[in-house]
Amino acid sequence: MAATNLATAKVQWRETNAEVQGKSLTDPRNTDGVEIFQRNGTIIIRTQKTIQVRVFTILGQLVSQATLQPGTSELRLNSRGIYMVKVGNITQKVAL
């Protein structure tokens, strides 16, 4: 998993085997199988294929940019707030 994080070295995507429970913020039938979740200050993405993901603050500042491999990945953010998650042509607002 290659990742470039611009805000801080502590903000990194990591692959996880943790079971994700709850309702996805996106409908995988309409988003090429991409599911986006939020839990306790963490953005979680489950995908069936390699994807490019970018996370922005509500003011448009790039927080993280990465290429995620198939599976489940998570990004723990140090600050609460509203973030925009862009995966391909999908943009989803996530409140942490």
Image (spheres, helix red, strand yellow):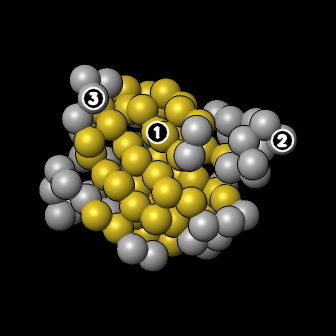
Q: Is residue 68 left or right of residue 54?
A: right
Under mark 1, the amino acid is Val
Residue in the image at 44% along x and 28% along y = 95
Q: Which residue is mark 1?
A: 85
Q: Which residue is mark 3?
A: 60
Who comes first in sequence, dot 2 or dot 1?
Answer: 2
Spot occupied by residue 30 in the image (x, y as percentages of width and height): 78, 37
Q: Is residue 19 visible?
A: no
**Residue 4 quadrant:** bottom left
In the rendered view, tell whether residue 73 sits above or below residue 22. Answer: below
In the rendered view, tell whether residue 33 sits above or below residue 72. Answer: above
Under mark 2, the amino acid is Arg
Q: Which residue is mark 2?
A: 29
Local secondary structure at mark 3: loop
The alpha-carbon separation of the residues under discs 3 and 2 comes to: 28 Å
Local secondary structure at mark 1: strand
Who comes first in sequence, dot 3 or dot 2?
Answer: 2
Q: Is residue 6 visible?
A: yes
In the rendered view, tell whether residue 34 sits above or below residue 23. Answer: below
The alpha-carbon separation of the residues under discs 1 and 3 comes to: 11 Å
